[in-house]
Amino acid sequence: MAGEAVAPTARALMCSRFTAFAVGDEDYLLATWHPSTRPVGVGLDPDQRWLHLAVEATAAGGPFDDRGTVEFTAVYRDANGRGRLHELSRFVREGGRWFYVDGDHD
């Protein structure tokens, strides 16, 4: 990840991860996933199109914080039609970089 921009906030990382899902960038998703919870692979569905993201709330996660949460709703379309993912995501900042840890979704 040398030479790449670093997300200054948890919200910014959430938005960049949504974009990575939308364009199918599994390497970026794994690189921004905290090592303690990172899966071996993401298993992106090539038939799933991520359409838009709405960030509903944030708590902490600013440039001077070490932890934060981002609540969001992401809308997608797949073989079954249109769907949504609502999640409260947890992030940590280590070594000056934000990482996605995990989230609770419905």
Image (tube, helix red, strand yellow):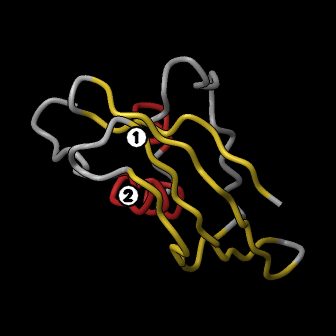
Closer to the camera: disc 1 or disc 2?
A: 2
* Amino acid at circle 1: Tyr
Image location (x, y in percent) of residue 98: 34, 38
For the N terminus, which image quadrant?
top left
Q: Is 81 rendered above or below residue 15?
A: below
Between discs 1 and 2, the one toward the N terminus: 2
Q: Is residue 46 left or right of residue 35?
A: right
* Residue at 69% over, 40% down: 43
Name the disc covering residue 28, or none: 1
Q: Secondary structure at mark 2?
A: helix
* Residue at 63% over, 29% down: 41
Image location (x, y in percent) of residue 33: 49, 33
Determine contact: label 1, label 2, CB under 8 Å.
yes
Q: Is 65 rendered above or below residue 17?
A: above
Image location (x, y in percent) of residue 70: 52, 58
* Residue at 71% over, 53% down: 45
* Residue at 67% over, 45% down: 103
Density class for disc 2 (Cα within 10 Å; few <14, some 14-19, many ≥20) is: some
* Amino acid at circle 2: Ser
Q: Is 71 rendered above or below residue 95?
A: below
* Residue nearest the viewer, comparing 52 with 69: 69
Q: Where on the picture, by quarter, is residue 28?
A: top left
For mark 2, what is the residue? 16
Q: Residue furthest left?
A: 3
Q: Is residue 36 left or right of residue 104?
A: left
